[in-house]
Image: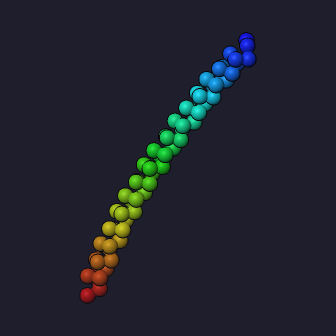
Amino acid sequence: MTFTAMRRSEHGTLQNMLGTDLNELATAAKNLANHTFMLTGLGFGTSILEWIASILVGLGSN
């Protein structure tokens, strides 16, 4: 195998490795976004329940 053939072979492998890494980063970014939206949604639901509970406590103390 010549030096040029080896360089091309390594270049192809490097491209594959970078492509795989970029795919993994994209997947991680999607997971982060999904988890962020889930946690934000749960936080919003919890704050509404706390608000309702505080109103009920206020109404019950009269």
Q: Quadrant of the N terminus?
A: top right
Compared across the picture, whether 18 is left or right of 51 comes to right
Vertical position of residue 31 compared to residue 52: above or below: above
Compared across the picture, whether 47 is left or right of 14 comes to left
Compared across the picture, whether 62 is left or right of 24 comes to left
Vertical position of residue 19 compared to residue 45: above or below: above
Figure disc tally: 0
Measured from the top left, where is residue 9 in percent x and y?
65, 20
Q: Residue at x 59, y 33 (%)?
A: 18
Measured from the top left, where is residue 53 in percent x and y?
32, 73
Q: Residue at x 61, y 30 (%)?
A: 17
Measured from the top left, where is residue 25 in percent x and y?
53, 41
Measured from the top left, where is residue 59 in percent x and y?
26, 82
Q: Residue at x 42, y 49 (%)?
A: 34
Q: Quadrant of the C terminus?
A: bottom left
Residue 48 occupies which quadrant of the picture?
bottom left
